[in-house]
Amino acid sequence: MAEISAGKARSIIRKAFAKGDEMGFKPLSVVVLDAGGHVKAFERADGAAPGRFAIANGKAYGAIMLGMAGTAQMARAEQQAYFMAAANGVFGGNVVPVPGGVLVRDKRDNVIGAVGVTGDTSDNDLIAAMAGIEAVGLTGEG
Amino acid sequence: MAEISAGKARSIIRKAFAKGDEMGFKPLSVVVLDAGGHVKAFERADGAAPGRFAIANGKAYGAIMLGMAGTAQMARAEQQAYFMAAANGVFGGNVVPVPGGVLVRDKRDNVIGAVGVTGDTSDNDLIAAMAGIEAVGLTGEG
Amino acid sequence: MAEISAGKARSIIRKAFAKGDEMGFKPLSVVVLDAGGHVKAFERADGAAPGRFAIANGKAYGAIMLGMAGTAQMARAEQQAYFMAAANGVFGGNVVPVPGGVLVRDKRDNVIGAVGVTGDTSDNDLIAAMAGIEAVGLTGEG
Amino acid sequence: MAEISAGKARSIIRKAFAKGDEMGFKPLSVVVLDAGGHVKAFERADGAAPGRFAIANGKAYGAIMLGMAGTAQMARAEQQAYFMAAANGVFGGNVVPVPGGVLVRDKRDNVIGAVGVTGDTSDNDLIAAMAGIEAVGLTGEG
């Protein structure tokens, strides 16, 4: 299985930030996780609140652990809030079920990691995440 | 970046209590956190319930970690309850999303800490917090 | 049962800091807990590390929950480390078994609270705690 | 107080990796925390084990919270193992008391963050951390 290399993770972060700057988003924070949900790289822009690592990580970690991107998690949360609360419980509180948590797939459609973006609205966070993923030739499922 | 000194933290607490006395509020508890969400000073008035540290701290800690004051957190909780539940998860249960958690800004608009007040209604808690913050020449975002 | 009032808690903290200044100790942090182990007041001096609340609280909280002051806890830890590790487990990690956690007794010898001091050596922390407690006419068991 | 900007954090990480490559160290992981112990940036080199974020973070986080670098923490752990075990308890298990956790000081000697490096021996981790910090004109206390 292909993995997200450190170099690609760095590029995803740089390109997600560039998209945020271009669009005039608030300061973003971006995490890249591997296929096991473990942190590969992270950066919090100047001016972002101190707790942004945990939010970014929660978006991406939940996506990996459930195999379900943030948008789908949010739909589930709106239909069945107690399910997502329970998922949060079993994963130690580290699930943030809103857009901006994006599964990363390779050309064979395998999940090879996830990206989590936070800082602006959830929808804008997702735009920045997708820009970062696509810039390195991978496919995002948001 | 300016910090809230121990002396200023003590003054904020004293003035918040004075406001509560003047307004006839129930016994208050007041915490002052630094810009990293770490406790600088706390006091629980005689007659306040034993668990008030955790509530006051949760109001102020959530404000710091999310970069969002209690009133804004409450609005988000009312629109999207599962988001604030998830935020609570990622921050170890230490987020209390109601008024009375106030970001403290210096003259350059940097967040230099937060104040959390609990004991009366959330709206009254916020009044006392703002009185304490303004009494030392700082700006509160409630 | 007498309780430690907010006023007395403030005095204990002020006098413990004064002792530290007089003795040339490093910046101290002082917590006062009630007889149930709940925070009544706390202050962290300028220059103390961010995590000092948790250390001060752990010293005082362990003293309350075990009914055993820091010096006795340390002796037990040296004889039977796994016992203190287990105590730490059952009390959620909030036990710091070294001097500076002091039981506060009234004239009838009832435990009415505890003081936790941290910042200098454990022995010096204890000196400051005792000075604060004695200054308000209470008895410390260190 | 100066802060470690995102740009400086990135440079610290890049230079620490470069030092590791130059010295022939195993694949490193490097975290940069702010003065409140919150993650600013992180990167795990290709080939490093999945759990390296938690180790790097624990080295740097413990340094911030205790105001004590990894080498001093290790000395304390060797003299008084139960104290560091207790510190680990009060800080949620996030303290790794070995070299490689380095306090970062500015020109006025204020702690403005911490760097945590893991992957090779603790002594080599420390060498890489110091190289990164010094490359951006800051001072490390290892």
Image (cartoon, coloured by chain):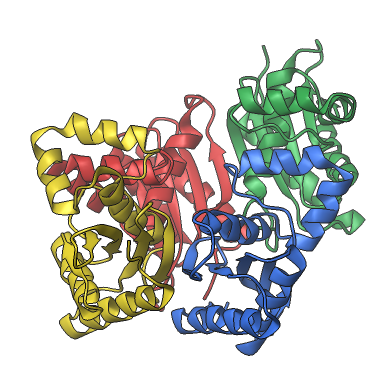
Chain colours: A yellow, B red, C green, D blue
Left or right of B135? Residue C115 is right
- Tell me which residue sits at (65%, 50%) in the image: D95
Of the 4 image quadrants, the one containing the N terminus of chain C is top right
State the image coordinates of residue D122 (x, y, percent, origin top left): 73, 63
State the image coordinates of residue A128 (x, y, percent, origin top left): 20, 72
Observer able to see residue B141: no
State the image coordinates of residue B8 (x, y, percent, origin top left): 56, 60
Quadrant housing residue C54: top right
Judge by depth and name the residue closer to the eye, D81 or B100. Answer: D81
Judge by depth and name the residue closer to the eye, D77 or D23. Answer: D23
Judge by depth and name the residue closer to the eye, A52 or D132. Answer: D132
- Tell me which residue sits at (61%, 38%) in the image: C41
Quadrant housing residue B134: bottom left
| Residue C116 drawn above or below residue B60 | above
State the image coordinates of residue A120 (x, y, percent, origin top left): 22, 67
| Residue A44 drawn above or below residue C65 | below
Left or right of D18? Residue D5 is left
Judge by depth and name the residue closer to the eye, C87 or B123. Answer: C87
Number of numbered discs present?
0
- Tell me which residue sits at (44%, 52%) in the image: B115
Observer able to see residue D114: yes
Of the 4 image quadrants, the one containing the C terminus of chain C is top right
